[in-house]
Image (cartoon, rainbow, N blue to C red):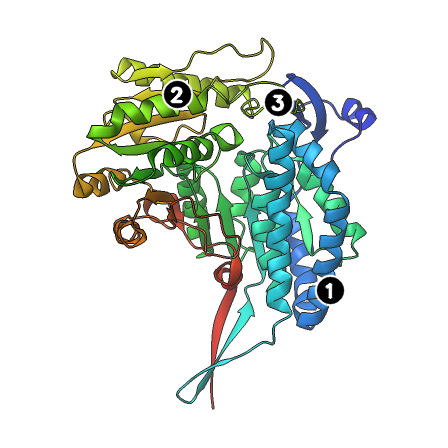
Amino acid sequence: MIGRALTRRERVRVRGSTVIDVINPATERVIGAVEPGDVHAAVAAARAAQPGWAALPRAERAAHLGALLDAMSAAAPELAALISAEMGAPLPVAKKVQVGLPLAVLRSMIDILEQPETAETVGNSTIHREPLGVVGAITPWNYPLHQTIAKLAPALAAGNTVVHKPSEVAPLSAARLAELVRQAGLPDGVYNVVHGYGDPTGAALAGHPGIDLISFTGSTAAGRKVAALAAANVTRVALELGGKSANVILPDADLAAAVKVGVGNCYLNSGQTCTAWSRMLVHESRHDEAVELAVAAAAKYTVGDPADPATRLGPLASAAQRDRVLGHIERGLADGATMAFGGGRVPDVGYYVAPVVFAGVDPDAAIAQEEIFGPVLSVISYRDEDDAVRIANSTRYGLAGAVWSASRERAVAVARRLRTGQVDINGGSFNPVAPFGGVGASGYGRELGTFGYEEFTTVKAIQL
């Protein structure tokens, strides 16, 4: 039940309505293919393997995950090149983030297993955490390996087995991961990859009665559908959805540093990041200065071949995503925003979008409210601190954000007022063991660290 990519000969042999071609977004050429799998058979395999996997001592599960970590570490350059080819991330980003981050997450789950298991005592009860059973994982194309490991590692650490449907846009890294799972010696049926489209494959997984938890990362619209399908079976759901994060720069902040880091965060992975600080909030007295700094920073983001060391922005992952982002840019202009930077030359072949900086953006405009998922920054002015908080909280999303100030205490006070799952203060670095997740239309549930591990468990009270 382990999914795999098709060889060139197999792709020709099975060509037809079933094969899913994988397109390199930089070249628009087919670089591989996968064949849709059988959800029911994969769930059956996972359910058969789960009791034995859960019965293993924590140390043995840790050893299995350690073997997988070794296999992934050895294959890291190959995985980075594969992800770069299938979804367009520049190689430095693919190496450091697309592969480096999931390795850190997997290591963190091994660390949890290596700690002694403890039971909390409440009155005459002891509280135990136990695996849920079979986890259905549905992951997107923007961080294909990281989003997989963020679900797979804690699920397996907790004693669950997994059925995984990767995005059809970027499925090759999941197919390679399945081979590494086998190479590392994990038992058959513990990790099962089922390739396919959201409908019917993802829908079949979300609505399958043999699934005990659906963990989904993707758009808010798709998340609603997943939750509705799971509800029919009263299946637990964890959703990590969209974002429209605000970078709140207070008047006393180091404006140059805040803008430079803010532009970099917005443009990371060509803007295809759910936590991207796509709204830059600056005091009205510093709006024009911030725009000048943002334009200067954006001009340094070279667009081109992901394999070229000089490239900072690769293509978007698909033609559909490119067209969607271009549509948002046109809508922004139609709504009266000023394009302070944009419209630059991009390669003739590939799904490229040049970086954009919009100035004077109305906080209620579509480009300030909707997740664009491309290299598009909106600079928005505010009157005072209360106005900044109001604007930051004015979208339906609540996944991430940032606050900058010369006073850490003031920054933290503002951060506490933001309705979001996490906030970075003065460029605080991403923490792979801190809880990750959102509120509102950004979803519910948490990934990473102890909170992510516990998401894949259930609690049992034993009265003594």
Residue beneath the point at 67% across and 27% down: 85
Residue 464 rendering spot, x and y as whole percentages: 47, 91
Amino acid beneath label 3: Ala
How many angstroms separate mark 2 from mark 1 (CA)? 49 Å
Q: How many marks?
A: 3
Residue assigned mark 2:
295
Residue beneath the point at 58% across and 35% down: 167
Residue assigned mark 3:
310
Q: Secondary structure at mark 3?
A: loop
Amino acid beneath label 2: Val
Residue 234 rendering spot, x and y as whole percentages: 44, 57
Of marks 2 and 1, the one in the foreground: 2
How many angstroms separate mark 2 from mark 3 (CA)? 19 Å
Of marks 3 and 1, the one in the foreground: 3
Q: Secondary structure at mark 2?
A: helix
In the drawing, what numbered circle is on residue 130? none
Q: Earlier in the sequence, mark 2 or mark 3?
A: 2
Apparent side of residue 128 relative to residue 32 in the rendered image (left or right) = left
Apparent side of residue 342 relative to residue 18 in the rendered image (left or right) = left
Q: Is residue 195 visible?
A: no
Apparent side of residue 169 relative to residue 255 in the rendered image (left or right) = right
Residue 248 rendering spot, x and y as whole percentages: 30, 39
- From the viewer's perspective, is residue 409 above or below residue 60? above
- From the viewer's perspective, is residue 114 above or below residue 88? below
Residue assigned mark 1:
63
